[in-house]
Image (spheres, grey):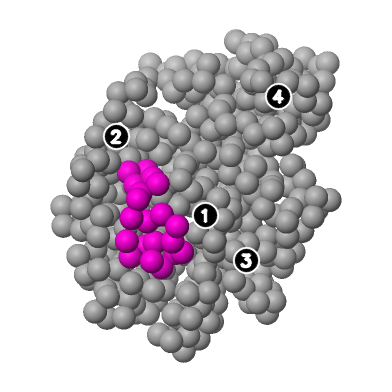
Amino acid sequence: MQVKSRRIWIKNPLDCLDTAYAGGIVVQDDIIVELIQAGAQPLQAVDEVVDAREHVLIPGLINGHHHFYQTLTRAFPAALNKNLFPWLQSLYPVWARLTPEMIATSTQIALCELLLSGCTTASDHHYLFPDGLEHAIDIQVEQARKLGIRVHLTRGSMSLGEDQGGLPPRTTIQTDSEILDDSQRLIKTYHQYEEGAMTRIALAPCSPFSVSEELMRATADLAQDLDVRLHTHLAETHDETDFCIKMFGVRPVDYLERVGWLTNRTWLAHGIHFNDDEIVRLGTANVGIAHCPSSNMLLASGQCPTIALQQAGCAVGLGVDGSASNDGSNMIGEVRQALLLQRLRYGAKDITHQKAFEWATKGSAGCLGRDDIGEIAVGKQADIALFKLDEIRFAGAGSPAAALLLCGATKADKVMVAGKWRVLAGEIVGVDIKQLMAQQISLAAQLAGV
């Protein structure tokens, strides 16, 4: 029996990012079907009205880069106060002890934290597959489906061990054939090509310092054959540039081009240390960049040249990055960090709150190769977030939409993904958060050997 379509009017928000829907929006099933101007009524009858007069209505935020498993190693003592390479070397042996239960719980924790912060689509970069963890991505798919959040899960990989000149220990790497065979399996099993897809798979060798040149080429070929996207870390630190020059004889962008990755199929995490010529080449190829401001500040990596990249032709989005280098998964908080960090580089006039929201919505959607999410418009997916301004930090705020960032919003009141409410009254529907947190705390202690 077919379920009857329902039309929901999210009515008269306190504020929004575009006056075209100052009177709200109408959602039917999983699609936005009408934008209501201030003082107007829907063109057709609706089945339900949601009073939004206390809420700021924004498009659902899109997280363009993350490492869910790292929620188990937040503020990890052995990794404190270190730059990227020594930070990684202190954590790789710990992460090599991950178990399937840890992946399931850490994925839930990361996705719950993201949902509560107004995020409706999340990309994760998982690249650790030690013995016993071969089906980590399958576990992530299962957890995302339970929570009803949209995901782009990237099949990461590491194949270049310490004894081969790479950074990761041998216990964390796989062979090229293992990686490529599993990549193909995951795409054929889970990747949804259709508009409105809830689950997509991308291919994501971890970084130039953790995989071979042969694997980078083969991965690009496979992505082309199966029509999926490519993702990796690039130009995050000066150490990485030095590594590429020493190992491959070229800078990171030259290496990217050499292995067939300088294409509009690719989006990169971080993208900090580019020269002017490299920015032009990246823009010409329409490569996407996921800016990760909190992580870049915590690890002292540098500032992404966001405006220059956009002007060159790159899609620029935002990512919270790993919860061990952030150390959180709060997407609305990340939008604020992007606003503040980029103002240091470009000034207040060019980095507005609207620009920061654009990076976290339409920009991130562009990185993921999506044009059906990332904005509130007729025909787009009904992915939205509603925030209240009922905390002391907002008292006296003039512009409610700007106040979300300037006053530091941390938690959404309502979140809808594909037309379904996943957060109501600041709580995730159907999730016992206290029980989940207790399980995470226990597993984190187990992983740390406490």
Q: Which residues are magenta?
A: 71-90
Give residue 283's position: percent from left, percent from top: 66, 69
Magenta-span inclusion, residue 72: yes
Q: Which residue is mark 2?
A: 441
Out of 9 and 440, give the one closest to the viewer.
Answer: 440
Real-space CA distance between mark 4 and mark 1, rounded to the nearest whole angstrom: 27 Å
Mark 4 vs mark 1: which is more N-terminal? 1
- Answer with mark 4 or mark 2, whichever residue precedes in sequence: 4
Say which mark, if any, is on residue 298: 1
Which disc, if any, is residue 286? 3
Q: CA distance from mark 4 to mark 2?
A: 32 Å
Residue at image location 53% in from the left, 16% down from the top:
425
Q: Please identify the dominant SS of the magenta region.
A: helix
Mark 4 or mark 3, earlier in chain:
3
Q: Position of residue 404 (x, y in %)?
A: 68, 32
Crowd class of label 3 (few under 14; some 14 to 19; many from 20; radius 10 Å): many
